[in-house]
Amino acid sequence: MYGLDAISAHNGWQLAALGISIVFTCLILLSLAISQIHKALDFWDRRYIYYQRIKKLVQRKHRSEATVSDPVLPKNVKESACQCKLLIERIGEPFPLPRLIDFSKKCGLLNSHSSVNDLLQAKLIIPDGKGYFLWNHEVEKNIKVSMKMNS
Amino acid sequence: MVNLLIEFLSNTGFALAGYQNIVMILVGIVLIYLGIAKGYEPLLLIPIGFGILMGNIPVIRDFGLGIYEKGSFLNYMYYGVMHDIYPPLIFLGVGALTDFSALLARPSLMLLGAAAQVGIFATFLGALALGFAPNEAASIGIIGGADGPTAIFLTAVLAPRLIGPVAIAAYSYMALVPVIQPPIMRLLTSRKERLIKMEEPREVSKKEKLIFPIVGFLLCCFIAPGALPLLGMLFFGNLLKESVVAERLARAARSSIIDTVTILLGVAVGASTQGDIFLTSKSIGIFILGASAFAVATAAGVIFAKFMNLFLRQKINPLIGAAGVSAVPNSARVVQIVGQAEDPTNFLLMHAMAPNISGVIGSAIAAGILWSFLGG
């Protein structure tokens, strides 16, 4: 068999069309991939700079949240914060809330439940997302700063 | 005594030689002449030419001398051809020799290497139309890839009986790139286009060169696994080169290994072209189709470069499209020569290396695709 009949009989048109399409696809994908290599490497080389920028942004955000919560912090809450901080240092972080309450009762802290509740509302004690709680050092720092400024 | 002498004389080459042996010996001498006197791909044409001489010395059958007789010296050499051992080893050396910077600096030029592979598939169709079986047509089409090892690689699995003519055609046309390509390039481009100067490619970092062989290998072989032996060794060789810490291995790959394999491959392929197998109407068809494959591949590269210029702000010189047919680095050199004939201050060699190298990758992918289509 010869000519166009032979090509059609052996699926020549389909094979050729598919073949050249795959070659093009492969080389187009490869060219796209390698055109991004230097950008990816550039990003990798600057990863510390980007990390620092993100860290600063997060810190700034935390600070602004803390300054908003600070002015409404009454004196008795600040006192319970000082006491609770010592207790938390003893029991370690992260800690379960009932343990902090028990420990504060044993140590003779008055109104343990309401004190801990005040600290939760003031965001001095924050959940870690896994069922435990952490002491919020950022908010604590802001409280100290504002106390210094007030005095 | 007289009987012994008569028997001896009847076993000599003079008594056994047929006209086919004589013709093939002349072909071998022409190839050696082209390699030595004209300097056309001497590293390939001299071993192949001498292989043709070795393969066409008429010997008594079943004497353990012929290339197709099991256990003969030539048969052992031929083993590496038939079992696709030599082509990937040559690719290892090519990878260890090649600098991919030009490609990494301007990846869009890779498309020219893809466009030139049109020659393979167009010739595949042409060979089918001329009555060749699909596996034979694919082996003939791959000549358009202008890559000897790739042509041998595919032919060994699809049409082993055609290895001789396909390999000779591929290497001969690769040697004749400076003769075949320039008229087509001039025909398809205007003087204004040939004068286009391209901007300097950006500098490529060491890290980019290191990452490329890994990314290239994974991407290409996930899409076309049939190209694994060739591209695997190509990118591995390049990784050895770029890693610097494996310089000893890279040096071995680009010198002793590639040289040894070139000798073995050349002689074995040459010796496989015995007159009675080689001098057939099929071989003539293969040579005609091989030449057209080269021409179509060159034309497709140039035309695609012109097509790309329709969309590009920074125009590319369409001559570099001709380098999309592998033939590293001959076709890139031809681009440089044709470009400089118009403007001696125009340096296109570096730019042409990008499509030239992508042509190597493209033809290996095309071989892998044809193998997966027709190998089963």
Image (cartoon, helix red, strand yellow):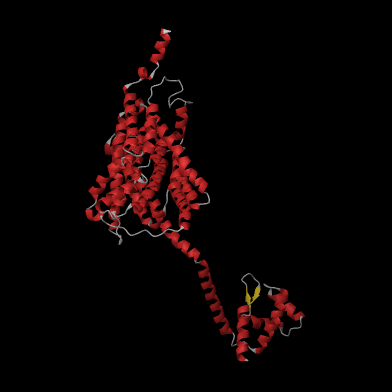
Question: Which quarter of the figure is the C terminus of chain B placed in?
Answer: top left
Query: In which quadrant of the rendered view does residue A113 lie?
Result: bottom right
Question: Which quarter of the figure is the N terminus of chain B placed in?
Answer: top left
Rendering coords of residue A109 (x, y %): 74, 83
Q: Is residue B149 in view from this perspective?
A: yes
Left of B111 or right of it: where is B232?
right
Rendering coords of residue B293 (x, y %): 31, 41
Left of A131 or right of it: where is B350?
left
Numbered-mark total: 0
Point out the residue furthest to the front here: B37
Rendering coords of residue A130 (x, y %): 63, 69
Name which residue lies at 40% across and 51% down: A26
Q: Is residue B342 above or below residue B327?
A: below
Name which residue lies at 69% across and 84% down: A80
Q: Please name whichever residue, B258 or A51, is drawn nearer the observer in this view of the structure.
A: B258
Q: Is residue B131 in view from this perspective?
A: no
Q: Is residue A38 above or below residue A80?
A: above
Name which residue lies at 48% across and 45% down: B251
Query: In which quadrant of the rendered view does residue A34 lie?
Result: bottom left
Rendering coords of residue B132 (x, y %): 32, 34
Q: Please name whichever residue, B207 or B276, is drawn nearer the observer in this view of the structure.
A: B207
